[in-house]
Every structure is written in C-alpha cells, then in structure tokens.
Image (tube, rainbow, N blue to C red):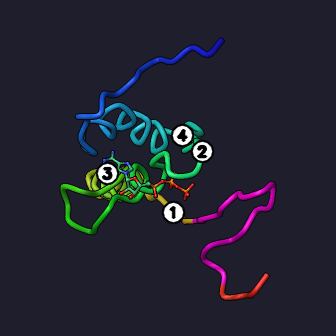
Amino acid sequence: MFKFNKVFSSFASQADVFSDTQPLIRSVLDGFNVCIFAYGQTGSGKTYTMSGPSTSKKDWGVNYRALNDLFDISLNRRNIFSYEVGVQMVEIYNEQVRDLLSNKIA
Ligand SMILES: Nc1ncnc2c1ncn2[C@@H]1O[C@H](COP(=O)(O)OP(=O)(O)OP(=O)(O)O)[C@@H](O)[C@H]1O
C-alpha cells in the first residue's frame, strides 16, 4: 500500500507541480538537505516534469524553476550570505549511475 501526499490531475501545469516543491528551494538556502527525485516507469513523464518539453518559460520543469528561485533568493540575500552553487546531473538506469555532464565515455 502506497501513501501519497499529493496527486496532480492531468490538467496540472508545470507551474502547479513546481509550486508544491517550491518551499523546498528556500529550505536549501536555509541550510537543509533536500532531494527532489523523479521516479517512474519509462514514458511516465520524469523528463517532462523535471526539465520540460521546451525552453519556453511556461514549459520550464522543476529543474529550471528551482535554479531560477535559487539564484533569485541568493541574489536577494547577497548582502547577508554568500552561497556557492554546484550542479551534478546523473542518470540511474539499470542500476548503473551515469554522469550526464562528463565528456568521458563510460
Ligand atoms: N504532463 C505532461 N503533459 C503532456 N505531455 C507529457 C506530460 N508528461 C509527459 N508527457 C509526454 O509523454 C512522453 C514521455 O514523457 P517523458 O519523456 O518525460 O518520460 P520519462 O519518464 O522521462 O521517460 P524515460 O524513462 O523513457 O526517459 C513525452 O512525449 C512527453 O512530452
């Protein structure tokens, strides 16, 4: 038996989905560890949800929106805190972890 905190309808927009995770972005900058994890079978919409179908702002997925908020908030706090931001992108497929930002052929 699975329990869900929230289920979105098929009419939910990218903005609707992000609004549910948005408070977590502020938590990161307040010093908490946060993990936003897309999990689901092939074709279930992980890439769509996390990256978005195009680079148009309304289509932005969680990743773009989260980074946008991260930089907005850190800019607003620039006189108080100095943040260092690093990005990693990995794919876990068939129990193999692959670095998507590496030039090396695995
Ligand atoms: N919320 C959505 N609204 C409209 N189309 C969607 C939505 N989510 C997914 N799709 C479409 O469904 C198809 C599969 O989605 P997507 O590629 O994001 O799945 P995935 O879980 O990342 O798949 P894989 O595990 O194979 O990489 C794509 O054509 C995508 O545009």
Of badges 1 and 2, the one in the foreground is: 2
Q: Which residue is mark 2?
A: 41
How many neighbours does mark 4 have within 10 angstroms: few (below 14), some (14-19), or many (20 or more)? few
| Magenta-drawn segment | 88-102
- Disc 2 on helix, strand or loop? loop
Q: Gap in Å between the C-alphas at discs 4 and 1?
A: 12 Å
Amino acid under label 4? Gly
Q: Which callout, 3 or 2, points at the residue further toward the start of the chain?
A: 2
Residue 53: x and y, percent? 32, 62
Q: Nearer the viewer, residue 77 or 62?
A: 62
- The numbered disc on residue 84 is 1
Of badges 2 and 4, the one in the foreground is: 2
Residue contact at pointers 3 and 4, CB within 8 angstroms: no
| Residue 79 in sight | no
Q: Which callout, 1 or 3, points at the residue further toward the start of the chain?
A: 3
Of badges 3 and 4, the one in the foreground is: 3
